[in-house]
Image (cartoon, coloured by chain):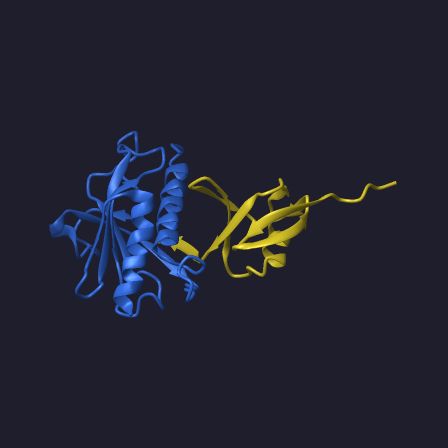
Amino acid sequence: MKSDWMRAEAYLLMKRFGRVEFDVEHFWWFWVHRFPLPPGFNKEESGLLVELDVTYPFTAPKNCYLNRNIRSSTGDPIDHYFSGSYHNKFFSKGWAWLSLHIDGWKPDANIVRGDNLLRYCDLVYLTLEGLARQKGEG
Amino acid sequence: MGGQQKSVEIMIAGEKMSMPQRISGRELREIGNLNGRVLMIQRGNHKEIVNDSDALTLREGDTFVDAPIYRVG
């Protein structure tokens, strides 16, 4: 059942990040309250909201959002991070959209072996690490 | 005489495999049957991307994980 799958995902996320919430009715989002940011940013952590399609886990997470007040450690804006309302459906809820796209999502019946939200969080981290490095601040 | 390459046991995508100690990122990904995937070395919770062009010296017990390809923009 999808709810069992989502609870297992939540458990994996909680083991790594602590407090996690998710949409128990429609499974449209997961919220990691304290997602650590790599060096190079003005904050050490952010909330991370992961938006899912109804087809998840068979397709990759749809979008991800971070807190809206994140900049580089020198105060510069971050590429591919949209804190305004453009392309950002959760602007009014205080989120900023990180334009991350996934190709070749491969889930597995064994949740740990296949692609899962924990792995997606790793990609968010690596993406941010790369963006900080581009700015010469990572 | 050229010395024979030492083999080391590593974990790659959840499987234990024996690999030559010196190997490129591309060879590792191909042997691990991970074409079309991003290959990363895992150290604790931290993961670092392995590029095809990287010349690796593997250590016993090194752990590599894979992930889908990702991009920004």
Q: Horizontal and vertical percent for residue B5?
A: 76, 44
Q: Is residue A87 visible?
A: yes
Most extreme residue toward the left is A92
Q: Left or right? Give the position of B8 relative to A101.
A: right
State the yellow chain: B
Most extreme residue toward the top is A74
Q: Which residue: 39% across, 40% down?
A: A129
Q: Which residue: 45% across, 39% down?
A: B44
Nearest the eye: A21 or A43: A21
Q: Which residue: 39% across, 50% down?
A: A123
Q: Is residue B52 visible?
A: no
Most extreme residue toward the right is B1
Q: Quadrant of the C terminus of chain A?
A: top left
Colour that chain A carries in the picture: blue
Q: Which residue: 59% across, 57% down?
A: B32
Q: How many marks?
A: 0
Q: Horizontal and vertical percent for residue A125?
A: 37, 44
Image height of A111 relative to A46, above or below? below
Q: Horizontal and vertical percent for residue B11?
A: 56, 50
Image quadrant assignment for residue B55: top right
Q: Quadrant of the N terminus of chain A?
A: bottom left
Q: Left or right? Give the position of A110 relative to A94.
A: right
Q: Horizontal and vertical percent for residue B2?
A: 84, 42
Image quadrant assignment for residue A104: bottom left
